[in-house]
Amino acid sequence: MEPLERYRSIVDDFDAFLAACERPLGNAVRVNTIKASVERTLEALAEEGVGYEQADWNPRVLDLETDSPGSTWTSFHGFTHGQEEVSAVPPVVLDPEPGERVWDCCAAPGGKATQIAALMDDRGTVVANDNNLGRISALRFNAERLGATSLAVTNADARNYSLERFDFDAFDRTLVDAPCSCEGTIRKNPDALDNWSEGHISSVAGIQKGIIRRAIQATREGGTVVYSTCTFAPEENEAVVQHALEEEDCRVVDFDLGLEHSPGVTEWDGETFDSSLEQAARIYPHQNDTGGFFVAKLEVTA
Amino acid sequence: MSEGPDATDLAANDGQRFDRLPATESERTVAGRATREAVVALFADRFGIPPATFDEYTFWEKGAGKIWIYGGEAPTPLEIEAIGMTCLRTRQEHWKPTTDFAQRFGRHATECVIDLDREAARRFASGEDQELAWDGDWGYLIAAQTVADRLEPLGIGLYVHGELRSMVPKGRQRDLTSSR
């Protein structure tokens, strides 16, 4: 937990934050509405005798009272998919509509990409990309299990992604759920901080900046780019969005979020960021008893 | 006599890329490739799935006889990892639908659907074969069970000699309880 000390100055009730980071998480699943409605899924769980609690902010997110959410009938039928509660936030902020062209540029293992497909009623084109071929097999497995027919899966580095393979030249929306130092996943994975270093943060931030720039370039004017990470480091969050604001045509926009959260920071380690970054959301583990997340919503401008 | 164009004029299948299925035999340019017409007819003739179910979808081949169903936009040919989901294996004597296709589209089926009780469904999901009575056609069936008051497909089974063989792939098999 030592690396988290650096956030003492930006986190309200830091002791509650640290205490939450030490508690394990429950078993959250997302209802896959491509296969079944929320009502039918709840009925199926009740039939199986599996207790559940529905998230206040999103009726499609459930906390299951079982130690093996993958060994339920609802999972076998593809009605439910194991996905952490905060991990369901970025696709909701992206807010895709049926028929659109959407790019999930760091998509494996596919929880968010299939959530995007479900939000679009599985109608339209969701390009799910990842640079790691091994993780793509997990993405494909999940996409087929969940019955997502609108997904096209590509294996490329998002930083220099080419749209030439398709018939269109821009996406309506893009999700950049960037590779990150994963500090916010400590409750799920107690080893998350084992390889933590400021050097790692700095190198991963360079990759994040390259990906967010390409995402904005590949999205049409007026389109939406959502940038998210599961980490707390401002170097990987606000500083990356600040870089995008300086280098590409875009602005930060506000969004509603039914989860308690803190605003994005505008100062960190001697650097200042644009005041619009206050409209980003920092979700801390002690606020909603979840993992940690950062989400910013951008509009592509001329 | 071969069906459609003379086989010697046809190209060989390139298993590395996605090619959209030809609508009919007369439009076929690759030897041995299934047509959209034949794929939709199989689902209609064998399982009673109305052809209109697939109006919004395209069918593709990548790999030898591996057919994919896709709802998004893409040019043909296309060299990427996957589009939509695999739905059917052709280029073998009996065309075989996939478990994931049965789960996604099998609820539209009216024929060759075997309704399993919870214990039989549990055995099917774990990959076990089982002795069962079935007075319909032998061959590939859609196994299903009742979930929340509706029949819900579990996957593809092969029925022969009084036995239902589970075709659920290893990675999709699960040990589930049979209690209600």
Image: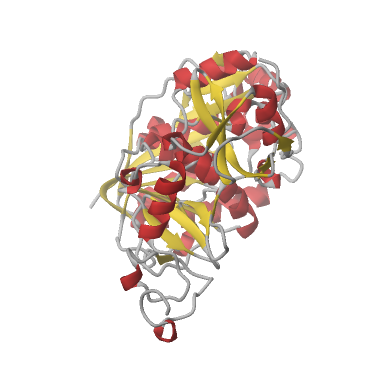
Above or below, comparing residue A287 to residue A302 in the picture: above
What residue appears at the point 72 percent right and 35 percent down from the top-left corner? B131
Give left or right: position of A192 versus A239.
right
Q: Which quarter of the figure has residue B156?
A: top right
Image x and y of residue B41, in percent: 39, 53
Image x and y of residue A32, in percent: 49, 31
Q: B9 or A62: which is nearer to us? A: B9
Q: A86 or A108: which is nearer to us? A: A108
Image x and y of residue A224, in percent: 33, 43
Above or below, comparing residue B65 to residue A147 in the picture: below
Above or below, comparing residue B112 to residue B26 in the picture: above
Give left or right: position of B72 versus A23.
left
Give left or right: position of A286 versus A125.
right
Image quadrant in which the N terminus of chain A is located:
top right
Q: Residue furthest front?
A: B135
How many numbered circles are shown?
A: 0
Image x and y of residue B129, in percent: 73, 39
What residue appears at the point 65 percent right and 36 percent down from the top-left corner? A183
